[in-house]
């Protein structure tokens, strides 16, 4: 009964349009009362959930991404990618995906990547006569790579729940992120195959490429410093996030000179709001997950899924379906906390590497970021392009199919994600 009330109240609140984080908090209170727990446990549970060393990385990475965004790194990355491949056939498509991958390695957030890059890339693709709807979906889908390529806030949250290494997740996410980017390039090129009005620019000169590289190098070095420091044993992922903030401030203030004392408060305010949103979701979702576990609802659901089939392929497909649907309605942090207590026993029963699981589950959520009805990236992209989300639904389907193919490969070929760990 407590499980029905927990999920039922959550669903009702979502339908009524209550924000997800508030819905999680209110439904958790309902669940506590239905399970006979004292409401005095609520603050203790919340404190225990957010008071984790690994989660310190979240506000630091958010701040580092905000600093580099305000420093103008997005324009510099776009210009560099454009001078390298922009002149080729469908080169602008490659520019969108490559730039998104680089920016993903800085911001760690899908919506942030779309917001930072969409205002430049969507109009640029429209000027080059690409279909506006396809361009919007491409930018929105490519921005979702931000939660797959390290450093990823999603990996930090997942690691804090499942108790696996954040650095292992960061490393395992590199190849899957690249594969997803390639699949989106292939899909976009296929969708543009009959468009003969596309305008191709002249190749950039060596001097222009060198100038663009010198301008973008400071932004490109950030992921190198973060990942190099982690895997070189210099600092932990949490310490790497703090180093990224210091590096970003040095670049933004002294090199690019876009961050001044006048706008530093704007940068800090933006990062504080984003960080508070993530941590509020974590706090409420953790109480929700705690109720699921202590009231044995999660165990009952796990046993029910295991009773459906003993076939590993069927169960892994079922896990993917669960998170694919969850990604359509929930943000990544909420989905991890709500559904990991249910699927974790299944993954352990199947002897699935939890680092590999973290990667393909995150890919599910990345696809969900552009899948209606509540694809956050899609709404951000549509707002920038000035089009309705309903007009983009048909354009989304090929990208979802392309992402699903990569998802299946990552689910059933572990070497594509965790294979790189053996090299280190």
Image (cartoon, rainbow, N blue to C red):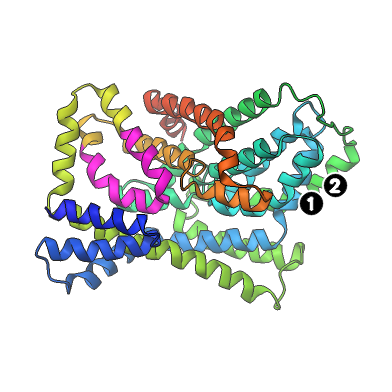
The label number, if any, that marks residue 81 in the structure image: none
Q: Position of residue 199 (x, y in %)?
A: 84, 32
The percent coordinates of residue 277 (x first, y second) are: 45, 64
Query: Residue drawn at (63%, 43%), measured in percent from left and top?
Result: 100
Q: Residue placed at 43% from the left, 50% from the top?
A: 154
List x then y, in percent, for residue 203: 87, 32
| Left or right relative to 322: residue 371 | right
Assess disc 1: are there few (<14), some (14-19) or many (≥20) residues with their C-alpha within 10 Å of its C-alpha: some
Label 2 residue SS:
helix
Q: Is residue 98 above or below residue 257?
A: above
Label 1 – label 2 distance at C-alpha:
6 Å
Q: Residues within 10 Å of mark 2 (few under 14, many from 20)?
A: some
Front in this rendered view, residue 405 or 150: 405
Q: Which residue is mark 1?
A: 215
> Would you say residue 53 is visible in this rendering?
no
Q: Residue furthest left?
A: 36
Q: Is residue 334 magenta?
A: yes
Q: Residue at x 20, y 33 (%)?
A: 305
Boundaries of the magenta span: 319-345
Residue 374, above or below 26: above
Question: Residue 14: where, in percent of width, then height?
Answer: 35, 56
Question: In front here: 128 or 365?
Answer: 128
Say left or right for 329 vs 78: left
Residue 68 in which image quadrant: bottom right
Q: Which residue corresponds to mark 2?
A: 211
Using the image, determine if residue 126 lies above or below residue 406: below
Please, what is the dominant secondary structure of the magenta stretch? helix
Residue 376 visible in the snapshot: yes
Q: Report which quarter residue 25 is drawn in.
A: bottom left
SS type, badge 1? helix
Q: State yes or no: discs 1 and 2 in contact (Cβ < 8 Å).
A: yes
């Amino acid at each position: 009964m407590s499980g029905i009330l927990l999920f039922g109240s959550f669903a009702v609140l979502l339908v009524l349009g209550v924000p997800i984080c508030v819905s999680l908090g209110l439904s958790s209170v309902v669940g506590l009362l239905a399970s006979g727990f004292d409401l005095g446990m609520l603050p203790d549970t919340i404190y225990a959930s957010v008071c984790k060393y690994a989660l310190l990385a979240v506000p630091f990475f958010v701040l580092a991404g905000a600093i580099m965004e305000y420093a103008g790194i997005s324009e510099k990355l776009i210009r560099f990618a454009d001078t390298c491949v922009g002149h080729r056939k469908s080169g602008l498509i490659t520019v969108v995906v490559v730039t998104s991958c680089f920016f993903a390695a800085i911001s760690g957030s899908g919506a942030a990547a779309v917001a930072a890059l969409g205002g430049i890339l969507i109009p640029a693709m429209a000027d080059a006569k690409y279909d506006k709807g396809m361009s919007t979906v491409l930018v929105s889908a490519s921005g979702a790579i931000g939660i797959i390529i390290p450093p990823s806030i999603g990996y930090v949250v997942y690691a804090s729940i499942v108790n696996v290494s954040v650095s292992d997740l960061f490393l395992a996410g590199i190849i899957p992120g690249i594969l997803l980017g390639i699949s989106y390039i292939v899909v976009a090129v296929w969708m543009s195959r009959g468009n003969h009005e596309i305008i191709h620019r002249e190749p950039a000169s060596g001097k222009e490429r060198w100038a663009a590289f010198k301008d973008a190098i400071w932004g490109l070095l950030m992921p190198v410093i973060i990942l190099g420091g982690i895997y070189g044993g210099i600092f932990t992922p949490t310490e790497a996030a703090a180093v990224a903030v210091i590096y970003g401030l040095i670049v933004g203030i002294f090199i690019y000179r876009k961050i001044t004392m006048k706008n530093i408060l704007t940068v800090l305010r933006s990062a504080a709001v984003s960080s508070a949103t993530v941590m509020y979701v974590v706090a409420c979702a953790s109480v929700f997950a705690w109720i699921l576990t202590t009231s044995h609802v999660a165990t009952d659901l796990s046993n029910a899924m295991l009773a459906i089939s003993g076939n590993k392929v069927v169960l892994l497909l079922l896990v993917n379906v669960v998170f694919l649907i969850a990604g359509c309605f929930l943000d990544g942090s909420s989905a991890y906390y709500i559904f990991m207590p249910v699927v974790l026993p299944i993954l352990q029963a199947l002897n699935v590497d939890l680092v590999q699981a973290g990667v393909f589950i995150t890919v599910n959520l990345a696809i969900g970021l552009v899948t209606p009805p509540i694809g956050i990236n899609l709404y951000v992209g549509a707002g920038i392009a000035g089009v309705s989300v309903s007009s983009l639904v048909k354009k989304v389907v090929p990208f979802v199919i392309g992402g699903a193919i990569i998802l299946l490969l990552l689910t059933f070929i572990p070497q594509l994600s965790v294979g790189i760990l053996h090299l280190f």
